[in-house]
Image: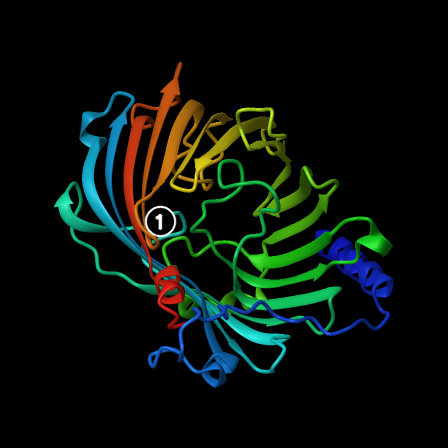
Amino acid sequence: MLRGLAAVSILVFAISVASSQPAFIGLSENIPPAPTPTPAPTRIDSKFKRWFDLDAALFQTRYQYIKTNANPAADASKQQWQIFIKGHFSFDDLGKYRVNWLLQTGTNFTAGWNNTGLGTGPRQTNLFVKQLYFDARPTKKFEFQIGGIEVNRGEATEAITYDNDAYLTGERITFRAPKQLYFDEISATNAFFGDFNHPSIFQRLHHLANSNYHQFLVRKQATKQIGFSVDYTFESGKDRLHEAVRFKAPKQLFFNTLLFESYQRLDPQRDAGFNAFAERVANKWLTVNGGFARTDRRITLNGDRFQPGHRVYIGSVVKLKHAFSFNPVLFHAIGALPTASTHRTRLDLILTYNLLEDLHHHHIL
C-alpha cells in the first residue's frame, strides 16, 4: 500500500512541475585568486574542475572517554581517527548531471571513526566508499538521485533521526517549486535500509531492487529567521514522524541559532522524543553550543552520542588557524537509564584539519 501511495504522490508532484524551467547551475568551488601579479603555478586548472571537484575534505582525530551507567567493562578511553572526503564528477558544463561520492572511515551504519589502537579497542584501518550515486537536475524545480544516497533529514539532526554516518541504497526525487507548491522542498525517497555492517556501497548496490524504507519530506523557509521541515518515515515496519524548526535569533538574544526537533513513533510501541539546541557565534574564532535531548530506548540508529534517556550537552568550536579547529563536546545523562551499558557520560575532544579550506586559502583549488 505504501508503494502505491508513493507512486500516486510522485505522479501528482510530477504533473505539478511539468512546465519547462531554466537549467540548474551546479555549485562551484572556484575561489577568486588573491590579488597577486600572476596566478599561483600550482593552482588547479579550471578545465580539470569542469569534470571533477571536491566538496569536502576533512582529516580528524579525537580522544573519546565513555563512562557507562553501571558496566565498567564497557567503559572506554581511546584515540580515534577519521577521513571524510566528498566530491563529484560532472558530465556537463552546468553541473546538471553528475556522480557524487563519499570516501569515509568507520565500519558500520553508525560509525565514521576508526580506532588508532591507543586505548580501548584494536587498531582499525578501514576506508570505504559509502556514498556513490547519480544526481540529475535538469531544471531548477526537479532533482533525481539513484544509488548509494545519504539520508535527507530536512532541518532535523542526527539526535532524533539517523546517525550522521548513516547510508541508504535507493532513489529520491525532489521538487523545488515554492511559488506553485508553497514548500521550498518536497522529496520522496524509496530505498533499502540495512546492511548495517557493510558500509561499502559496492556491497550494497544489489539492494537497489529491494525496498523497506520510504520517506516523504517537506521543508520551508517561512521567513528569513524561521525554517522548518516535517517528514513521515517508514522503516522496516516502523512508522515515525519528524518535525524540526530552526530559528535565527535577533541580535538582542544571547544565542544566534535555536533549534527544536521532535519525533513520534506511531507503530509499533508508540513513543516520542525531542532535542532542543542553541548556539552562539561569539567571534570568528569561537562558537559555543549546547542543548537537552530525550530519546526512548527503542530508537537505536540515531546519532550514537544521543543514547536513550535524558541528556544535557555542551560543546564549542575553536578556530585555531584557517584550516584547523578544536571541538570539545560533553554529554551527560540525567536520571534513570534503560541498561547498565547505556552511556552515562561521554567526552569527545576533536581536532580537525580541513584540507579543502587549506587548498582554497593557498589558491590551489
Image side of residue 181 versus residue 253, left or right = right
Q: Residue furthest bottom?
A: 47
Looking at the image, which residue is at 34% across and 81% down?
Answer: 41
The residue wearing badge 1 is 111
Q: Amino acid at mark 1?
A: Ala
Residue 261 location, x and y as percent? 59, 32
Nearer to me, 178 or 146:
178
Above or below 84: residue 133: below
Above or below 31: residue 50: below
Residue 364 location, x and y as percent? 37, 73
Q: Residue furthest left?
A: 118
The quarter of the picture where residue 71 lies is top left
Looking at the image, which residue is at 77% across and 60% down?
Answer: 10
- Where does the C terminus fall, quadrant-wise? bottom left
Image side of residue 77 versus residue 266, left or right = left
Residue 336 location, x and y as percent? 39, 15
